[in-house]
Amino acid sequence: MDKVMSNKKVIALYIAPALFLVLALIYVPIVQTGYFGMTKWNGVGAKEFIGLENYMALIKDEMFWKTAYHSLMLAVFSVISLIGYLFISIILAGKIKGADLLRKIYLIPMLLASVAIAQLWLKIYHPSNGILNTILVSLGVENPPSWLAEPGLALYAIIVPIIWQYAGFYILIYYAALKNIPESLLEAARIDGATPWQIALKIKLPLIMNVIKVTIVLAVVGSLKYFDLIYVMTDGGPNGSSEVMASYMYHRAFKEFDFGYGSAIGFFLLVICLVVTWIIRKFTAADENVY
Amino acid sequence: MNQPVRKNAAPVILPEKQSSFGTHSLWNRTAYGILYLFLAIVAVFQIFPIIWLFLFSLKNNQEVFNMSPFALPEHPKWENYAKVWTEGNISQYFMNSVVYTVAAVILTVVLASMVTFAITRMNWKGSKLVLGLFMVGLMIPVHSTLIPLFSTFTQFNLIDSPLSVILSYTAFNLPITIMILLGFYEALPREVEEAAVMDGASINHIFFKITLPMTSPVIATAAIINMIYNWNEFVFVNTFISSDSYKTLTVGIQNFIGQYTTDWGAIGATLVISILPILIAFFILSNRIVEGIASGSVKG
């Protein structure tokens, strides 16, 4: 048994193709991104090594910090929306008939291409014929805003479909975790006279705290690297008011052909995502002893 | 396990419980009704935009602009679908999406199965490290790899080639696929495989003839999750592919909609065509999709 299952050649053969792809297409590129960030490069010509110039410029780049702030807002709203998702899941995991069907309905938007969702919401927000303003006008609102064209509103108008899109995903995760709680625990609390509200807050929430922490990481990191919907709906506009880090990187590299600077943003994005993941994990790992 | 105990206790508790239910029953039913209404409203909010999309995909502009958005079209304009399918390159984009998706799903599932097999079934130093390498891959933002990938593919003449897209899909989906497979492999009894070793079977024989068939349920789950990701992917195709003949639906509909900005029916029909395969897969395989998303998200 041991001999066959320790055959080095076979092991290498089974691991190598996948490992090669992941190394070549994920790990080598992130190192390269860090290096390309130290060059002046238009994407086709020779790279000119300029040291940390791009990274220094990045730190002083007001536009970059603006996009970082937009990404942060996205993360904040995503984490806040987790509370809503959790609330829905707790109701759903109670004795609700048709819970299974409901949570599948909730999931549908998450399965669809962000590009299709973005195009659909462009129509929803359409200033004159979109369904949102049609409803607002029929309710007597005289001059409904032209959502995505207003610098003060565009970012928040985009956050709504993002929350809509991911609702089913987080509800699914919370629902599965809540259903994993042993019924005997809840039964014991009920016999002791605990109200459903007390059971939810004092028993269910602490028991699924680990899952909640994972979803916080997913929501924050997912928001920081968010791209598709914004690229299609506003392309960062109007006037950069909905530009986020990933779309800014894309613009600088693939539209303005400043690949060196784009790489610096890409590397910064990587560092931020890894650091944030690490901080949340560390911070929540220490928490675990409490429960 | 507590069941028998509770059953014994039931006759004692039951009368008391019933009486307390009696006094609160109206309140209970109202509360239940309100919660139900709330859940239903959320469901409507989730599903309504998609229904509205179906409705306007069957209307012409006059109907979209002058009728209530909730109204059914008088005569459904199925010709919107015929028009976008033949004009523009929608049929071509659709076929490309199918080919890239299928190729990448097969490649990813086979490679991920081999890795998971080697990690869970074979004995070697460094298996933990290699697994860790795959799992950390989950955290790397695609955008941090985009410029070097673009430059490398250009160097190897793979830019504007389907291969660049298929390989990228595979590399970036391997981590989550391995994660989905891992739980199943670990729970799977090893007796059959051990018996095969005793009988002198080769590892390839064990993997292809015994393990792969035994893991078919989780392979189905992993495949459907991969299919959804690949079908919906946007940024790789948008960056690596420039020829219309190689574009997928997600990128193609962008161009197409750019040309038809004022024809709502055509846009609606295009979007419906692009989401329909996923919706159909969901109606048939919703349980597998739910399971795949759950196992691919939390355990990490």
Image (cartoon, rainbow, N blue to C red):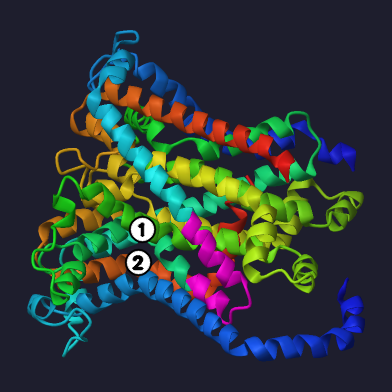
Identified by mark 1, the residue type is Ala
Q: Nearer the viewer, residue A108 or A17?
A: A108
Residue A234's spot in the image, x, y percent?
Answer: 20, 48
Residue A61's spot in the image, x, y percent?
Answer: 25, 22
Q: Is residue A100 magenta?
A: yes
> Which residue is depicted at the point 36% across and 33% down?
B146
Q: Local crowd at mark 2 within 10 Å, few (<14), some, or many (≥20)?
A: many
Q: In the figure, A160 relative to B58: above or below?
A: above
Q: In the figure, A65 relative to B18: above or below?
A: above
Residue reaching furthest front?
B23
Residue A95's spot in the image, x, y percent?
Answer: 63, 78
Pointers 2 and 1 within a single chain: no
From the image, tell me which residue sits under label 1: A113
Q: Chain of mark 1?
A: A
> Which residue is depicted at the point 39% across and 23% down?
A33
Residue A252's spot in the image, x, y percent?
Answer: 23, 29
Labels 2 and 1 touching (C-beta < 8 A): yes
Prevailing secondary structure class for the magenta stretch in the rendered image: helix
Snapshot quadrant of residue B73:
bottom left
Quadrant of image for the N terminus of chain A: top right
Horizontal side, residue B157 vs residue A111: left or right? left
Horizontal side, residue B66 vs residue A22: left or right? left
Residue B236: mark in rendering = none
| Residue B201 visible in image | yes
Q: Local crowd at mark 1 within 10 Å, few (<14), some, or many (≥20)?
A: many
Identified by mark 2, the residue type is Ile
Horizontal side, residue A104 vs residue B244: left or right? right
Q: Is residue B118 magenta?
A: no
> Which residue is depicted at the point 57% across and 51% down?
B297
Q: Which residues are magenta?
A: A83-104
From the image, tell me which residue sits under label 2: B275
Q: Chain of mark 2?
A: B
